[in-house]
Amino acid sequence: MAELKKVGVLTSGGDAPGMNAAIRSVVRSCIFYGIEPVAIHEGYKGLIDNDLEIMNARSVANIINQGGTFLKSARCQEFRTPEGRAAAYENAKAAGLDGLVVIGGDGSFTGAMLLEKEHGLPCIGVPGTIDNDIFGTDFTIGYDTALNTVVEAIDKIRDTATSHNRLFLIEVMGRDAGFIALNAGIAAGAEEILIPEDQKPIDQLMDSLENSGRAGKTSSIVVVSEGDKSGGVFELSRAVEENFPAYEVKVTVLGHIQRGGKPSCYDRVLASRLGVASVEALRDGISGVMVGVRDQKIVQTPLEEAISKHNAIDSNLLKVADIVTV
Ligand code: ADP
């Protein structure tokens, strides 16, 4: 096995709280094992533009508690082309990189997989996205923080909902997955939770709101995942107003506040664990995998599987959501 002397690290795609903690962990794991860490600014764009910086242990001081990513993330169209990836590889080779840690989501992992297949640069994926929609890990970095942000926001909205007999439709992030909506919805006591994995007909929502009214509820919170296919929160709002003229319906789209903020304790620990695991995998001569946690243990999943498979929503949680809203 060739000696590992230099490892690059970048953050790519949508940012997530805890990405800084992951960069810090990769950098310090490298130093711990006598490897030179090289940070790449702005994801794959920085690799193509040769925007690289050698790190030391102090370069990542005081960032474990910061949201976002100090290396910045970017969407890079050029990297989607073979020519773009070849240019990125030439810079990686010239810098002497023996491996690359990519912190991001499934798009970023697709890029990493192609870079390794086409040019042989060993790559490891670290799942960083608030949506928790990556196969091969129970939790992605940023998800726990986003959940807590959403629950805090819904708690505040509930205060005004109950003061005015209002019905609030709250849209949360998750274009393809309803993990945030389902878990935050249960935690915040939502009356209804609409997610793409359990698409309910609109009549069912109306029945449920009617039952809520009969059960004596004077205000309601409905959490809607971005990926829900009922036509979006504004369309739903019109439908509810038609059916329940007595209700004052309000829509809140939580939007980007869900991505920001200080990472939670869980995300900091997860990011620290996965950062170490990524460097240790490269040292063991392993690449083309994503590191994740399953049942509290570190596991590796081929990047190909991580991007093509999906974690299923826990059907028991759906049942819990139904039971606790009677
Ligand atoms: P995420 O990693 O959060 O899913 P994106 O899908 O935007 O975010 O991907 C981040 C970056 O990864 C893209 O801007 C692009 O540079 C690279 N990427 C995404 N998909 C591909 C692909 N199919 N081939 C090559 N590179 C890709």
Image (cartoon, rainbow, N blue to C red):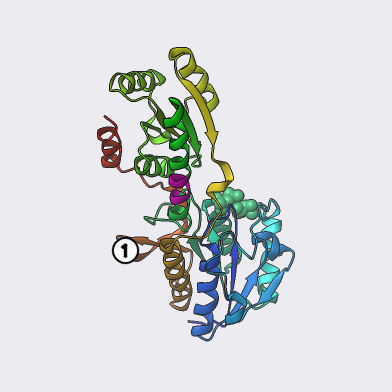
The answer to whether one can see residue 107 in this image is no
Q: Residue at x 56, y 53 (%)?
A: 260
What kind of element bears circle 1?
loop
Return the residue at label 1: 296
Q: Main secondary structure of the magenta part?
A: helix
Give the residue at the far bottom of this rendering.
Answer: 34
Q: Amino acid at mark 1?
A: Gln
Q: Which residue corresponds to the image point at 47% horizontal and 28% vertical from the top-left?
A: 229
Q: Is residue 247 above or below residue 251?
A: above
Work out which quarter of the rendered image holds the C terminus and state it.
top left
Q: Nearer the viewer, residue 173 or 274?
A: 173
Instruction: Give x and y (percent) for residue 261.
Output: 54, 56
Residue 224 among magenta residues: no
Seen from the viewer's position, the closer of residues 158 and 294 is 158
The correct choice, above or below, for 34 with respect to 275 in the image is below
Q: Is residue 33 left or right of residue 42?
A: left
Given the current orientation, which residue lies at the most extreme right position?
A: 49
Q: Which residue is depicted at the point 58% across and 56% down?
A: 111
Region rendered in magenta: 147-152
Residue 150 inside the magenta-drawn segment: yes
Please state the total of marks drawn on the protein image.
1
Frontmost residue, 158 versus 22: 158
- Residue 130 screen position, x and y as percent: 49, 51
